[in-house]
Amino acid sequence: MRRWIAPLLATAVALGPLVGRTQPSPAPPSVADTRAFGGVSEARILEAIRSARVLGRQNVGSTSVNLHLRLEGGIDAAWKPRTTSHGESYRAEIAAYRLNRLLGLNRVPPAISRPIQRSALRLAPDSPVIFDRDNTARGAAIYWVPVLRPSRIDGVEDQERWGRWLRQGRTVPPDQSQRAEEISTLLVFDFLTGNWDRWSGANVPMDAQGHLIYRDNNGGFLEPLPRWKMEIIFSFLQRVQRFSRRFVDQVRAMTLASLRRAIANDADGTEPLLNDAQLRAMMRRRATFLEYVDALVGIHGASEVYFFD
């Protein structure tokens, strides 16, 4: 992966000596009941989307099967199943949520595996959904965030605007500091997960409080990742020269062992969400990212690179 460092630093004038690495902060708790998402306990959300009775469903997918499940109790879910067209990519949604949790973030909606009976889905005969012998289909149940609004950061002009904020020597408007940090962290998160499909349209909405929501993560964790997709995630990371110190510390603290514990098995406890090759590929991307950050610190100084808390 080191061959990618030079292109990532193409905008730098010169490479100075690297400074010492920041000491990592302790890994965040991994128990959902210590956390909340949008003011609701994550434990409560996960239990609801895993087991609450399905009252109704509506297809909201375009290129893939994505159902809005109306659930008993008032907490709804999106449901993305295993299909003949997208295979097991639903697992990436759950893995992304757990990685978000490991890295101390609160931006990926809670997600958990859930099998649903064929009779509750009322699918067309030619549906690509794959059913098991017991007539259930397994998929990712993802918290349906009640209020989502366009963030207006994915258009060409929008990307040019925030791209300036994240470059060294440019000014970040005081009222846009939070948004700039959320975009910076999103691009790093997508680099770590290998999610090449973030900017294909409407995948970065904001919630009622104006915070970005990192949804639609099923494009991540491909292994092997085709070179052209690798170049996409590198090109977006290359736009970022300012980072959250706290987030980088969490990435530094992540080890293969902690990643295994965080991702672990599917909800039924029988199958790992990601295989060993996928986990190791993510750790290689982590190492490349940290080399990039350290090189930028050597050029511009820690205070300029760790621009956000």
Image (spheres, grey):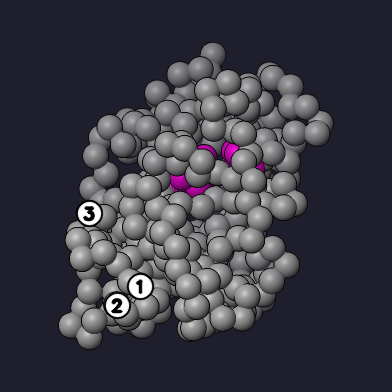
CA gap, disc 1 and disc 3: 18 Å
Q: Element type at marker 2? A: helix
Q: Which mark is residue 121?
A: 1
Closer to us: mark 3 or mark 2?
Answer: 2
Residue 235, image x, y percentages: 42, 28
Q: Is residue 183 magenta?
A: yes
- Disc 2 residue type? Arg
Residue to which mark 2 is pinned: 118
- Disc 3 residue type? Ser
Q: Element type at marker 3? A: loop
- Disc 1 residue type? Leu
Residue 39, image x, y percentages: 73, 67
Residue to which mark 3 is pinned: 85
Horizontal side of residue 168 vs 203, given as left or right: right
Residue 48, image x, y percentages: 55, 79
Q: Earlier in the sequence, mark 3 or mark 2?
A: 3
Q: Can I make out residue 220 in this image? A: no
Between 88 and 275, the one nearer to me in the picture: 88
Between 100 and 175, the one nearer to me in the picture: 175
Query: Does residue 270 sit above or below 188 in this rendering?
Result: below
